[in-house]
Amino acid sequence: MKKFVKVALAATCLMTAAVSQAAEPFKIGLIIPMTGPFASTGKQIEAAARLYMQQNGDEVAGRKIELIVKDDGGVQPEATKRIAQELVVQDKVGVLAGFGLTPLAFATAPIATQSKTPMVVMAAGTSSIVQKSPYIVRTSMTLPQVTAPMGQWAAKEGGIKSAVTLIADYGPGHDAEKAFVKNFSEAGGKVLDSLRVPMQNPDFSPFLQRVRDLKPDALFIFVPSGQGSTLMKQFTERNLAGQGIKLIGTGDVLDDDLLPAMGDEALGIITSQHYSTAHDSPENKAYVEAFRKMTNNSMRPNFMSVGGYDGMHLIYEALKKAGPNANGDQLLAAMKGMKWVSPRGPMQIDPETRDVVQDIYIRRSERLADGQIYNVEFDVIKEFKDPGI
């Protein structure tokens, strides 16, 4: 009898512990820049994450979802690392997420590895990020992934025989430069020069003068979201288009949220990216409408927003699949190979690399019937993986 009572008590304790764990909130630590030069990135991601929760509820597999948003300012990797450490140790988050720029993701990777906490990168785009920790999964893009198709298109379809590259001098910019040069050259184009500008508060004037002197068919550009407007203004002021120089680049340059304020100087620019507000699908039309309603029409959803939205989808579905008491390794296993239809189109997580596989679109900026400028897709490269560099 005593043995039976002991067994029964032990079973009851185990059941109580399991119920208690399942009843505890599942916490997501969202580390994003909400202030500073990259605040627009954080605001887009947070709005999309909260929209996903609004649409899908705040309970998954019997666990209430708690979103803990932390502002890292976007420029100090050590600050991001410290915040991640606090979220893991003090708040006991089940997932780390966000990461607006590559250096911030790099700094946090050891925390994810040591604590065995899945780390969902929703924005940063350097190709090697997923190699920094076996717990990193990405829902944004890589710069080679969105740039390689532009290099091929420019030489084969765009009638561009020579180009100069101008990029922000940090990891994603280096990736974009290498990917464009490699693919453009392999397709028969010639790169006349590769220019790098400081990441923060750049003065584009001397670099654009160099471009004017070289007289390429096109200038390929990559700068962080928010700097494109300044670059295009100076490009127009120096009448480089009048010299026959086309402006092409990645979608960061024509950020959908900032595009309406750029004016006519933004028209006719061809970019490559994985998402556009104007993407023609039922899923995206519903997403854009809901996003704009939630933000009181203060923002257009851009490519950063879908990284946040799809990142939340990945976390929700992994928790459903792995169960309410899943540990980090089990959640990670559930994330690998996951497929779904996003506002951006079909996408999946590569089960081997944990990186995003998605369609990449070639777009032209046009003024549509509502009088506003959009990135209008006219070509697509299906299920494109990060090609590396």
Image: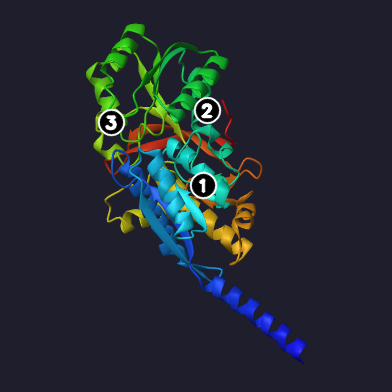
Quarter of the image where one finds residue 364: top left
x, y (%) of residue 225? 35, 35
Dot 3: few (<14), some (14–19), or many (≥20) neighbours within 10 Å? many
Does dot 1 land on a helix, a strand or a loop? Answer: helix
Q: Nearer the viewer, residue 294 or 175?
A: 175
Residue at the image position 41 percent from the left and 50 percent from the top: 83
Going from N to C along the chain, the mark reached first, 1 or 2, is 1
**Which quadrant is home to the N terminus?**
bottom right
Give the Cα separation between the discs numbered 1 and 2.
34 Å
Q: Are marks 3 and 2 in contact (CB under 8 Å)?
A: no
Q: Secondary structure at mark 2?
A: helix
Residue at x 77%, y 87% (from the top left corner): 3
The 10 Å Cα crowd at callout 2, few under 14, some 14 to 19, many 20 or more, is many
Task: State how the image is colored.
Answer: rainbow
Residue 325 lies, in percent from the top left, at: 60, 66
Precedes in sequence: disc 3 or disc 1:
1
Instruction: Inspect this view and state whether residue 171 appears.
Output: yes
Q: Position of residue 293 (x, y in %)?
A: 32, 57
Secondary structure found at label 3? helix
The residue labelled by disc 1 is 111
Residue 229: mark: 3
The disc label shown at residue 149, or none:
2
Is the residue 36 above or below the residue 188 in the image? below
Gap between marks 3 and 1 measured at Cα: 36 Å
Is 20 above or below relative to 8? Answer: above
For the residues labelled 1 and 2, say whether their Cβ atoms are less than 8 Å apart: no
Up-down relation of residue 150 to residue 347 (above or below): above
Which residue lies at the image location 54% right of the left edge and 19% below the top edge? 182
Label 3 or label 2, whichever lies nearer to me, is 3
Q: State the CA–CA distance, disc 3 to disc 2.
A: 23 Å
Q: Outermost residue toward the front?
A: 2
